[in-house]
Image: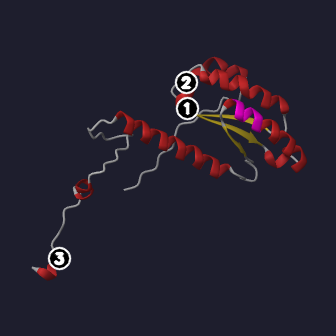
Amino acid sequence: PLTSHTPPRWDTAGQERFKCIASTYYRGAQAIVIVFDVNDVGSLEHTRQWLADALKENDPSNVILFLVGSKKDLSSPAQYSLMEKDALKVAQEMQAEYWAVSSLTGENVRDFFFRVAALTFESSVLAELERGSGARRIGDTVRISSKESDLYLSTPRKKPKCCQ
């Protein structure tokens, strides 16, 4: 049976009052999503500091980074084009994947979250494979087996009634 999983996420909205507790939420993250307003150059400039704060609690080589421009619907195509150039430079410096979204219109929101989920899932599976443990565990770990015989262990075969 398929089960759904909602990955935990925390939004401190860059607010100073959350700064002292934000590091608690950043610790051990698989993905870091830094969001800025595409209509506010100042918010793009703050993304470097937000990332630095998040990386104090995480190994940069073990986390997937995203830089996300929000409120794209409030920007004219010409304004957005200028901001996008700057945002792409910042994303490249951060080694982050860049996305632009609009919560109002829904543009790229679903695709973005699917991308985050896919990359974090892939990262978890690869990490588990690298650990190489042969034991099976129940819970949040995905096990992949190359043994063809394992595919049918849980479903006993029944003889068809017509051939008895």
Under mark 1, the amino acid is: Val
Task: Locate residue 66, reporting x and y percent.
Answer: 65, 37
Mark 2 crowdedness (10 Å alpha carbons): few <14, some 14-19, many ≥20:
some
Mark 1 crowdedness (10 Å alpha carbons): few <14, some 14-19, many ≥20:
some
Identity of the residue drawn at 71% across and 35% down: 91
Q: Which region is colored magenta?
A: 88-93
Sequence order check, earlier mark of 1 and 3: 1
- Label 3 secondary element: loop
Q: Given this view, does label 2 or label 3 mark the residue nearer the observer?
A: 2
Q: Nearer the viewer, residue 65 or 156?
A: 65
Principal secondary structure, stretch drawn in magenta: helix
The residue that label 2 is drawn on is 58
- Label 2 secondary element: loop
Q: Are marks 1 and 3 in contact (CB under 8 Å)?
A: no
The residue that label 3 is drawn on is 160
Task: Locate residue 75, reporting x and y percent.
Answer: 86, 46
**Quadrant in the rendering for residue 90:** top right
| Residue 118 in magenta stretch | no
Q: Nearer the viewer, residue 126 or 35?
A: 126
The CA distance from mark 1 to mark 3 is 51 Å
Mark 3 crowdedness (10 Å alpha carbons): few <14, some 14-19, many ≥20:
few
Task: Locate residue 26, reporting x and y percent.
Answer: 57, 26
Q: Given this view, does label 1 or label 3 mark the residue nearer the observer?
A: 1
Residue 156 vertical placement versus 93 (above, below): below
- Label 1 secondary element: loop
**Horizontal placement of 73 versus 8: left or right?**
right
The CA distance from mark 2 to mark 1 is 7 Å
